[in-house]
Every structure is written in structure tokens, then in C-alpha cells.
Image (spheres, rainbow, N blue to C red):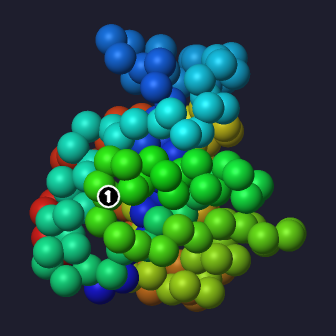
Amino acid sequence: MKILIFTEGTIIMHKNTKGHTRSEIVKRVEEKEESVHDFESYTPIGNAVQKIKNWKKEGAIILYFTSRKKTGEINDIKSVLKRYDFPIGKLLYRKNNERYSDIAERILPDILVEDDCESIGGKKEMTITNVKPEIRKRIKSIVVKEFGGIDNLPNKF
């Protein structure tokens, strides 16, 4: 079982979120609040670390997927995953003119976990939306509310 998990907005988020509702957090992103671009300071959403550890314990191959494209920012996301003890898994990112869907089509995960991209345009921005239909039907898509976390997902697939 190969699980591809989007990072920003799905399992990690900017640090200035404590005490704010999900809709307030979305608004801060839309307004480009300062900590949104401080990628190294991102923190886990809810119990994402433990949830993914459960999947790994069940034998899943974990792959992470970041929206970051610059080397420094990619390294910041890697640092966050390591600092908070997320299970080891390759961090994928777009190169050159690649789209998210290009990577998903190449990787062919059994499960794709991503958020609904509310703060950046919604469904049209999601990975699964742009995957070719013949490939999309081979991938189980799990969409969570942006910044809502993955705590409610099953511990086993």
C-alpha cells in the first residue's frame, strides 16, 4: 500500500494558528499572513504524526508531497517532518513545469490524501482533479478540509 500525503494544509500548517478556527486560518492564508511563508516554523495539524505512524506500522509506504519548489523551502519542509518525527518517507516536489497531477500519475499511489485547497482556489487546485481519468480511477482519493487535519481518517486502509 503506497500512500501519497500532501504536506502543507493537510498535515502541517504555519505556526500562527493556535487559538484560531479553521476558517480564520484559511483567511490568514488568503491574506498572506507573515508566518504562512515561514515554512521551517510549520507545525503538525492535530495528531497527524501518530496517524501516519499507524499507517506505516500497518505496512504502508509513506510518500509526502510538498507545494514548495525552491531548494531552501523544500529543505524547510523536510526539516519540519524530521523535527516532529513524522515517519520516514520520500518528499516529492514539482520540478520545472511539472504539475501535481504529473507526479501523482508517475508515482501511482494506492491512496492520495490531500486537502480541499480552500485558500488557494478549491477543487481546481487539487491534485486528484487534474489526474487523467483512466489513472484517477486507480487511486483512492481522500480529501480533508484544509487545515482540518487527518485525525478522523482510519488507522488502517
Q: Tag 1: Cα neighbours inside 10 Å, few (<14), some, or many (≥20)?
A: some
Is 44 placed left or right of 108 in the picture? left
Instruction: Give x and y (percent) for residue 107.
Output: 55, 85
Is residue 87 toward the left or the right of residue 15 in the image? left
Amino acid type, label 1: Phe
Q: Residue furthest right?
A: 97
Residue 125, percent across and down? 66, 51
Looking at the picture, tell me which residue is in the foreground, 35 or 135: 35
Front residue of this view, candidates 130 and 7: 7
Q: Is residue 94 left or right of residue 84?
A: right
* Element assignment for label 1: loop
Instruction: Give the residue pinned by disc 1.
Output: 86
Q: Quadrant of the C terminus?
A: bottom left
Q: Quadrant of residue 62?
A: bottom left
Residue at x-position 37% and y-position 49%: 83
Whether residue 115 is visible here, answered yes or no, is no
Q: Is residue 35 above or below residue 24?
A: below
Q: Is residue 9 visible?
A: yes
Q: Nearer the viewer, residue 46 or 146?
A: 46
Residue at image position (45%, 48%) is: 80
Q: Position of residue 44 (x, y in %)?
A: 35, 41
